Image (cartoon, rainbow, N blue to C red):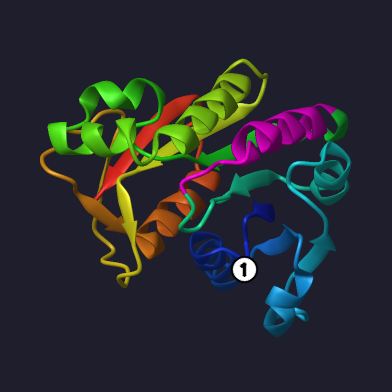
């Protein structure tokens, strides 16, 4: 399978790249800092560009079967319009190139998932993460209204822990406290979802 991975230089995206290479896929990444992937120079196709530029995304999207977005803002709680702009670029580029499959990493608590959040989670989402979640919600509206075969993935709080290999996934999951999931396990689900039609046009809530 030909995979385009956005956000490949981030911690979750790098896990996805490693899984794709281990699985024998042909991997293309779009990166503002191609030098961050120098160790994979002979194993992946690196396209220099910005995920918020429709031109750059379309250039990288040509010939792909699936786009996996693991874009994130690292430790920042400000979106700087990253997610809404990237969604516009991706949906526009998909129209240009004919690529239809998209697996998009969001966060639990965005959009309708907020209603299922615990009290502790809601406090964090309404305060600390308010700006970044609002921008993610805008990105999802664009994706849902597109003609793409999308999957929106909603992990609970991300950690750097090793993959457990066992995690919970559902359209909705009950929440208590502030549960977590490792980036490695999230990457595992992103990769598997890209290879299966099971989660097309569905929200996937994921936690340990």
Q: Please tell me how many numbered marks the rendered image carries.
A: 1
In this view of the protein, which residue sits in the foreground, 61 or 158? 158
Give the residue at mark 1: 24
Quarter of the picture containing the N terminus is bottom right
Do we see residue 128 in this rendering? Answer: yes
> In x, y percent, where is residue 185?
35, 59
Q: List the single residue furthest toward the front.
A: 127
Q: Is residue 152 visible?
A: no
Position above or below: 175 against 37? above
Q: Position of residue 107 (x, y in %)?
A: 40, 40
Q: Height in image: 22 above or below 154?
A: below
User: Would residue 89 be counted in the magenta stretch?
Assistant: yes
Q: Is residue 65 above or below residue 110?
A: below
Residue 72 x/y as whole percent: 54, 51
Q: Is residue 14 above or below residue 131?
A: below
User: Residue at coordinates 66% horizontally, 19% vertically from top-left?
Assistant: 146
Quadrant hosting residue 113: top left
Q: Which range is magenta?
A: 77-95
Residue at horizontal 31%, vertical 72%? Answer: 162
Element on which disc 1 rests: loop
Give the quadrant of residue 121.
Answer: top left
Q: Position of residue 154 (x, y in %)?
A: 38, 39
Q: Is residue 179 left or right of residue 27?
A: left
Q: Residue furthest top?
A: 145
Viewer-proximal residue, 177 or 68? 177
Residue at the far left: name it. Answer: 176
Q: Nearer the viewer, residue 5 or 161?
A: 161
The residue shown at (79%, 66%) is 46
Is residue 2 located in the magenta-colored stretch of the structure? no
| 53 with respect to 9 (left or right) | right
Q: Residue at x 14, y 31 (%)?
A: 119
Look at the magenta stretch and give its main secondary structure. Answer: helix
């Amino acid at each position: 399978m030909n995979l385009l991975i956005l956000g490949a230089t981030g911690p979750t995206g790098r896990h996805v790249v490693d899984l794709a290479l281990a699985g024998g896929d042909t991997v293309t990444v779009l990166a503002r800092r191609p030098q961050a992937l120098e160790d994979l120079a002979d194993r992946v196709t690196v396209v220099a560009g910005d995920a918020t530029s429709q031109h750059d995304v379309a250039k990288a999207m040509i010939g792909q079967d699936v786009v996996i977005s693991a874009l994130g803002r690292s430790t920042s709680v400000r979106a700087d319009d990253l997610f809404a702009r990237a969604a516009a670029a991706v949906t526009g580029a998909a129209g240009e190139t004919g690529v239809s499959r998209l697996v998009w990493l969001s966060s639990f608590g965005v959009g309708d998932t907020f209603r299922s959040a615990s009290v502790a989670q809601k406090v964090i989402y309404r305060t600390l993460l308010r700006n970044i979640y609002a921008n993610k919600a805008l990105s999802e509206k664009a994706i849902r209204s597109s003609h793409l075969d999308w999957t929106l993935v909603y992990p609970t709080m991300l950690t750097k822990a090793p993959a457990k290999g066992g995690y919970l996934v559902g359209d909705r999951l009950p929440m208590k406290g502030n549960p977590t999931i490792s980036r490695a396990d999230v990457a595992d689900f992103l990769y598997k979802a890209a290879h299966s039609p099971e989660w097309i046009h569905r929200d996937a809530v994921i936690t340990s």
